[in-house]
């Protein structure tokens, strides 16, 4: 049996809720496209059980399978914005408090060719 982290067995409530919402949205998108679970599974290259687990918001499903389902449904553009450093206001604020970072000193360039 593979080792699984606590995040898989008992994820934080906010994570579990997000996974459930995402799974429901993927299901709605699949049904709007009149696709069976088997059809989406074939497009993604996974089993129908994996698609059912994605739609059920199961935390043990791989990110590759979930993003594959989004791609197969044409919904992957929005996913490209996830964790964008330019949109990380908290991270940018923390970075500005730390002050400027200095570049490391590099060895002198040798111009002998």
Image: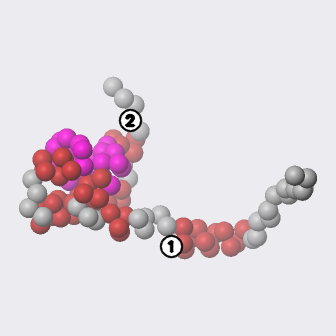
Q: Residues within 10 Å of mark 2 (few under 14, many from 20)?
A: few
Q: Earlier in the sequence, mark 1 or mark 2?
A: 2
Whether residue 98 can be seen here:
yes
Name the image colouring. secondary structure
| Measured Cα–Cα span from mark 1 to mark 2 | 31 Å
What residue is pinned by disc 1?
A: 87
Q: Is residue 104 above or below residue 45?
A: below
Mark 2 lies on residue: 4
Name the quadrant containing residue 111: bottom right
Image quarter of the N terminus: top left
Dot 1 alpha-carbon crowd within 10 angstroms: few under 14, some 14 to 19, many 20 or more: few
* Quadrant of the image occupied by residue 61: top left
Q: Residue 85 location in percent, x, y?
A: 54, 67
Furthest residue toward top: 1
Q: Which residues lie in the magenta part? A: 44-67
In the rendering, at what x and y percent does residue 31 appear?
A: 11, 62
Q: Nearer the viewer, residue 91 or 103?
A: 103
Q: Is residue 92 left or right of residue 25?
A: right
Tell how many labels: 2
Query: In what element is the residue under mark 2?
Result: loop
Q: Nearer the viewer, residue 5 or 48?
A: 48
Residue 110 is left or right of residue 9, and the answer is right
**The residue positioned farthest toward the front in the image shown:** 113
Query: What residue appears at the point 91 percent right and 53 percent down from the top-left corner?
Result: 112
Q: Residue at x 39, y 45 (%)?
A: 7
Residue positioned 62% across, 73% down in the render? 93
* Percent x, y of residue 99: 75, 71
Drawn side of residue 102 relative to residue 81, left or right: right
Q: Quadrant of residue 30?
A: bottom left
Disc 1 versus disc 2: nearer the observer: 1
Q: Are marks 1 and 2 in contact (CB under 8 Å)?
A: no
């Amino acid at each position: 049996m593979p080792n699984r982290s606590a995040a898989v067995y008992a994820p934080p409530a906010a994570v579990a809720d997000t996974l459930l919402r995402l799974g429901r949205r993927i299901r709605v998108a699949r049904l709007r496209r009149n696709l069976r679970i088997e059809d989406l599974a074939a497009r993604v290259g996974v089993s129908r059980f994996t698609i059912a687990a994605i739609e059920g918001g199961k935390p043990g499903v791989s990110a590759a399978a979930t993003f594959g389902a989004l791609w197969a449904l044409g919904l992957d553009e929005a996913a490209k914005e996830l964790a964008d450093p330019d949109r990380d206001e908290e991270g940018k604020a923390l970075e500005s408090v730390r002050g400027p970072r200095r570049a490391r000193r590099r060895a002198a360039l040798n111009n002998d060719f």
